[in-house]
Image: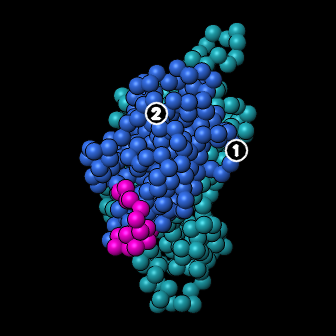
Amino acid sequence: MGASGTTRSARGSGDLSPDPALVLGIDTSCDDTGVGIALGGKVLANVVESQTALHARFGGVMPELASREHLEVIDDVLSRALAQAGVGLQDLDAVAATRGPGLVGALLVGLSYGKALAWGLGLPFVPVHHLEGHLAAAGADPPFVALLASGGHTALFAVPDWGAVTELGRSRDDAAGEAFDKVARLLGLGYPGGAALARLAAAGDDTAVALPFPMQGDKGLEFSFSGLKTAVALLLERDPGVRPADVAASFERVVVGSLVSVTLRALARTGLARLVVAGGVAANVRLRREFAAAGVDVSFPPPALATDNGAMIALAGAMRLASGRVPEHPLRADAEPYLPLTGAAR
Amino acid sequence: MSAGGSLLLGLDCSTPHLAVAVVDPRSGTLAARSDDVGRAHAALIAEALEALLGACGAAARDFAAVGVGVGPGSYTGVRVGVAAALGVARAWGVGCVGVSSLAALPATLVGPGARVVAASDARRGNVYAQLLERRDPRPWAVSYVELEAPRKLGRSELTAEYPGVPCLEYRTVAVAHGTETLVVPEASALAWGAAGAAAGAGEPPKPHYL
């Protein structure tokens, strides 16, 4: 990453090069309360209070419950992040928070807290697009093609520069991570079971079960996973004796195959050489292996930053400060549950 | 400006009104704003605070604590208010105290020593209600003592539950001192609720999810 911020900080001495900005980032877009601190592309703190256990018994995220929990823990998560980084609030140069997309009630907690914190400290506030955070976490410099594959999104973007993004294509229905979680539930692996499904797949035969390849024959840059999920459901109904590991392995082969083939097409079509893969599905071992096998210059977020967190928001916020692409009235930013990444430059 | 950090900030986002106030415990309300912002509390809170401090010439170092309305009211609004109050209190290094949002219904309309039922609409024929007493005899000390926890009850039960106690309801017209006034939240009483709170001490504000 290596982007240095414009900063007023007096940290360090005798060095005339501009100090990188010390930025605090907050993410409360879904069911994790994340606060992180970054200094010039380096993560100094990354504290995530996960609500997964709280929502597991409902089989999905309960928005009202998530919002309540964020409010309960956010002040404490901030304390832990400051302690982890070994800095005080007075050392910060800016505060960034996710403004969207996500669950609106959940977003509002982190956004309101972050704004008030920045205003109270007299610091710049940087509203950040959640997905830009995931991209920043990979540590690659633009230009690149980005594949975002998580429980909420599956899409391809061209990113010529930070804050300048065009969408190349997306899923017409389910997100890839959503398909993983839904199939995991069909296999009785609980919620969220995407990671458990991938572990089970390692023990299976990935050619044992015939599943339809999504968008077969299509030459576009879109994805589709709901038909695949339905095919698995029908298969389990028809043949309850099928080995779950074989189902998992075959399902994973098809999902990863689809993600990789469409992404390679996007790289060829844009002429861009670099790829950033982000979102929860970026942690998938098979996906990483297949991109590597295809000889792509690919960056993934480090495992600690692969799922939702505040550190990636701090990194993206620092990028925005350095590039000057910040909204005119950042303190007026509102939560935007459906904010497209292509609108993040506003 | 009063020196030494003794001012109190009050704020409430539990109704469509965004209410903010600065109170000096020695002289009363220095500045207060209450605007119907619909659902734009999160978008407007920082600017409202900026304008509020500008109106009374107060700065971060002048404050001793923050009092915030914890409902009952809009769950989302309450959370925006509490999150903002926590953020400001954290930045200033002062305490943050949760106060019933019903106490934001203006104590200026109630004489010292008097009791009042503060109420706001809770939809489906219900109201949020709470018995409050304005105990402080000083005319500029517009604070309330909460005589009970806020509750939700049928609108028709209000008079039977609180016989003879005047009711002050959000967005109704009250007559006080011979003039008609629209009842809207006023954050001074919330600021008063934070008097004496130290940074990091006590319970963090807990919303009333009624």
| Residue A305 in view of the camera | no
Task: From the image, tell me which residue sits under label 2.
Answer: B29
Query: Residue at the spot x=62%, y=50% of the render?
Result: B204
Please report whichever mark, 2 or 1, sits nearer to the chain's N-terminal start.
2
Residue B175 falls within the magenta-colored stretch? no
State the SS at label 1.
Answer: loop
Q: Nearer the viewer, residue A219 or A201?
A: A201
Q: Nearer the viewer, residue B168 or B11?
A: B168
| Residue A235 in view of the camera | yes
Q: Nearer the viewer, mark 2 or mark 1?
A: 2
Query: Residue at the spot x=45%, y=29% of the render?
Result: B30
- Magenta residues, start to end: B152-169
State the SS at label 2.
Answer: strand
> Which of the chains is blue?
B
Q: Which amino acid does the dot numbered 1 rest on?
A: Ala
Q: Quadrant of residue A217?
A: bottom left
x, y percentage for residue B129?
44, 63
- Residue A227, compared with residue B76, is above or below; it is below
Q: Do callouts 2 and 1 mark residues in contact (Cβ within 8 Å)? A: no
Q: Are marks 2 and 1 on the same chain?
A: yes
Q: Colour of chain A?
A: cyan
Query: Residue at the spot x=32%, y=57% of the render?
Result: A219
x, y percentage for residue A259?
46, 58
Circle 2 chain: B
Task: From the image, tell me which residue sits under label 1.
Answer: B201
Q: CA distance from mark 2 to mark 1?
A: 25 Å
- Residue A293, compared with residue A226, is above or below; it is above
x, y percentage for residue A80?
70, 44
Q: Nearer the viewer, residue B50 or A145?
A: B50
